[in-house]
């Protein structure tokens, strides 16, 4: 419960940031409006006007890495509390996490071996 | 926050540091120190016509610049400047810094998607790939410092380095964190999402005026915060002789930030798929080795 004032302060900082942005926008708006001219609001595309919208299906070439990332990111969730109590628990903590990490690491090596670690 | 005067000094130093970084960044590109340039650039961006791309996604378009700035500012809030002036002594500080940095990617992806332009979109997707590459070394290197301090409180991590700074105690971790920090702030060897000259500005291509100003300010704040993170977690934070704590933090932070800009001058831009490959083949195993290394040292 001790940290609630801290989180309130962080929330306050968020509010201040938003307020700062709003003040900046107001200042900007007070300095005049843009002229309405044809073709001005079209996104840049090498000197020509974009013909199609950009919101299309995009092949994310790194999907294999993304799956690996998910596994390792889950593992990180366990690493943080483990790191805090590591010294207290000693060799037991090292072995416990070592087995867990070894399994994950073998997975990484297997992926590498199967050619998963390159652009698909 | 015990002493309001220290807080004021720290805030002034932080603001001044951000301004100095703007000057340094231009110096790293153009080779001259133009002290008035950042102020002129702010005026320029404020006076510039603000064009909003057609068919843009309003919610994402408005959220992205503010979120970007907020992520950097919130991360800076939990990092201590001196023994008696942690702006916020958050018990889960190390984790919070990480969580805040994750939103940098979210903001950039939002910005890339919102404007409905191909260059911006490519920049956004690239940065997502970049996150998958830099995130593991960054997080694992941080965890190793937490192991040594037995606490996630950043101030405790600084005091754990009284005898030996983490840069010497875990050099692999430092190297990985440094490179990951460069990638997180998309500084030159890793500047995929904005890639001037290749993606024509990438994610920022369609942002003008006040919103671009917020992005640029957020980027500088992010670099400052990252340099501060390196200082606190690896360079002994406020420790040093003669000068007061916050002065040491300030000096170290500026030096680290200057080195960030310096690295980019001498390296060509990588390809993001190469970066992904190297990160998962070499950097992630190295980060695991670093954790094992620290684990063994702690048990000896």
Image (cartoon, coloured by chain):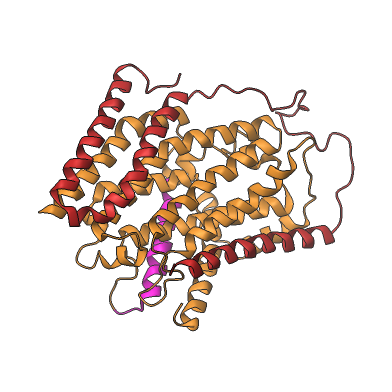
Chain colours: A red, B orange
Q: Is residue B251 left or right of residue A93?
A: right
Q: Answer above or below: position of B178 versus B281.
A: below
Disc count in the image?
A: 0
Residue at the location (86% across, 57% down)? A32
Nearest the viewer among B153 and B230 is B153
Dominant secondary structure of the magenta stretch?
helix
Q: Is residue B220 left or right of residue B120?
A: left
Q: Which quadrant holds residue A3?
A: bottom left
Residue B40 rendering spot, x and y as whole percentages:
68, 61
Residue B250 located within the stretch drawn in magenta:
yes
Residue A15 is drawn in which quadrant?
bottom right
Q: Residue A114 in the image: x percent, y percent? A: 32, 16
| Residue A71 seen in the figure | yes
Residue shown at the point (33%, 50%) measured from the top left = A80
In this rendering, does residue B271 appear at all?
no
**Residue A99: x %, y % from top left:** 20, 35
Residue at left 46%, top 71%? B87
| A57 lies above or below B48 | above
Classify the position of the C terminus of chain B by image quarter.
Answer: bottom left
Quadrant in which residue A104 is drawn:
top left
Question: Start and end of the magenta stretch?
Answer: B242-263
| Outermost residue toward the top in this view | A114
Residue B9 counted in the magenta span: no
Residue B88: x %, y % from top left: 45, 69
Furthest residue toward front: A1
Residue drawn at point x = 71 percent, y = 44 percent? B59
């Amino acid at each position: 419960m001790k940290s609630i004032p801290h989180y309130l302060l962080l929330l306050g900082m968020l509010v201040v940031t938003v307020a700062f942005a709003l003040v900046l926008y107001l200042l900007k708006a007070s300095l005049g409006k843009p002229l309405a001219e044809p073709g001005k609001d079209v996104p840049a595309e090498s000197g020509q006007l974009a013909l199609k919208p950009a919101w299309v299906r995009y092949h994310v070439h790194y999907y294999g890495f993304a799956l690996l990332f998910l596994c390792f990111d889950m593992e990180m969730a366990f690493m943080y509390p483990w790191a805090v109590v590591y010294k207290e628990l000693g060799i037991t903590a090292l072995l416990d996490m070592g087995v867990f990490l070894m399994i994950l690491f073998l997975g990484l090596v297997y992926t590498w071996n199967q050619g998963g670690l390159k652009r698909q | 926050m015990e002493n309001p005067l220290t807080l004021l000094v720290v805030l002034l130093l932080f603001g001044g540091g951000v301004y100095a970084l703007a000057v340094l960044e231009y110096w790293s590109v153009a080779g001259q120190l133009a002290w008035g340039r950042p102020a002129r650039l702010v005026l320029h961006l404020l006076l510039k016509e603000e064009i909003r791309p057609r068919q843009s996604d309003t919610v994402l378009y408005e959220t992205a610049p503010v979120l970007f700035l907020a992520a950097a500012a919130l991360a800076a809030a939990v990092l201590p400047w001196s023994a008696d002036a942690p702006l916020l002594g958050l018990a889960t500080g190390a984790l919070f810094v990480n969580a805040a940095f994750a939103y940098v990617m979210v903001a950039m992806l939002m910005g890339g998607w919102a404007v409905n332009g191909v260059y911006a979109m490519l920049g956004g997707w690239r940065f997502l790939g970049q996150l998958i590459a830099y995130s593991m070394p960054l997080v694992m290197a941080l965890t190793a410092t937490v192991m040594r301090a037995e606490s996630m409180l950043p101030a405790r991590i600084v005091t754990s380095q009284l005898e030996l700074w983490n840069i010497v105690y875990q050099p692999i971790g430092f190297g990985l964190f440094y490179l990951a920090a460069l990638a997180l702030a998309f500084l030159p060897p890793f500047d995929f999402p904005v890639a001037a000259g290749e993606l024509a500005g990438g994610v920022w291509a369609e942002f003008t005026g006040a919103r671009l100003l917020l992005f640029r300010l957020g980027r500088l704040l992010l670099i400052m915060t990252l340099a501060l993170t390196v200082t606190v977690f690896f360079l002994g934070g406020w420790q040093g002789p003669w000068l007061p704590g916050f002065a040491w933090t300030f000096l170290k932070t500026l030096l680290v930030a200057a080195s960030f800009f310096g690295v980019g001058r001498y390296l060509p831009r990588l390809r993001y798929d190469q970066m992904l490959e190297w990160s998962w083949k070499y950097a992630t195993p190295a980060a695991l080795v670093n954790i094992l290394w620290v684990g063994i040292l702690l048990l000896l």
